[in-house]
Image (spheres, helix red, strand yellow):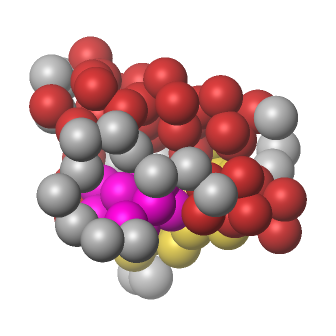
């Protein structure tokens, strides 16, 4: 697994990503994004604001799918691109 979230009750959530996953995410700028130099890596960091939804360790791709299933708009719109970058 090249990107996952480690969860523990005492420490909360910690995200681990391979260098390749980080590079893939940082090279992709979402279309229509009004922020200059904003990448999918930045979006993943922003989506961690919803980490209170995490109750167990999981892959980052599964976390994005969870947010998509709950209709978080940025995860719905850009989630497939994030997952594709993670799995490349």
Q: What residue sits 76% from the left and 33% below the top?
A: 87
Q: In this view, does 16 lie above or below 81?
A: below
Residue 26 visible in the displayed image: yes
The quarter of the picture where the N terminus appears is: top right
Q: In which quarter of the image is residue 13?
A: bottom left
Magenta range: 38-47
Spot occupied by residue 48 in the image (x, y as percentages of width and height): 33, 61
Q: Magenta stretch containing residue 44, yes or no?
A: yes
Tell which residue pokes out farthest to the bottom in this image: 11
Q: Which of 70 and 33 is in front in this view?
A: 33
Viewer-side residue, 31 vs 54: 31
Q: Which residue is drawn at 45% across and 60% down?
A: 39
Q: Position of residue 78 (x, y in %)?
A: 37, 32
In the rendered image, which quarter is residue 79 located in?
top left
Give the quarter of the figure containing the C terminus: top right
Identified at 74% across, 63% down, the residue is 23
In this rendering, position of residue 73 left or right of residue 61: left
Q: Residue at x 69, y 41 (%)?
A: 86
Q: Magenta-highlighted stretch: main secondary structure? A: helix
Q: Is residue 58 above or below residue 35?
A: above
> In the picture provided, is 48 more to the left or to the right than 11?
left
Q: Where residue 28 sits in the image (x, y, percent)?
A: 56, 50
Q: Residue 10: give x, y in percent of width and height.
A: 41, 81
Residue furthest top as drawn: 69
């Amino acid at each position: 697994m090249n990107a996952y979230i480690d969860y523990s009750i005492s420490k909360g959530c910690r995200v681990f990503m391979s260098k390749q996953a980080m590079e893939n995410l940082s090279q992709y700028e979402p279309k229509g994004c009004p922020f200059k130099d904003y990448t999918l890596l930045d979006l993943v960091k922003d989506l961690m604001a919803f980490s209170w939804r995490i109750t167990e360790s999981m892959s980052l791709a599964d976390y994005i799918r969870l947010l998509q299933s709950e209709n978080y708009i940025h995860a719905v719109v850009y989630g497939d691109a994030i997952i594709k970058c993670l799995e490349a």
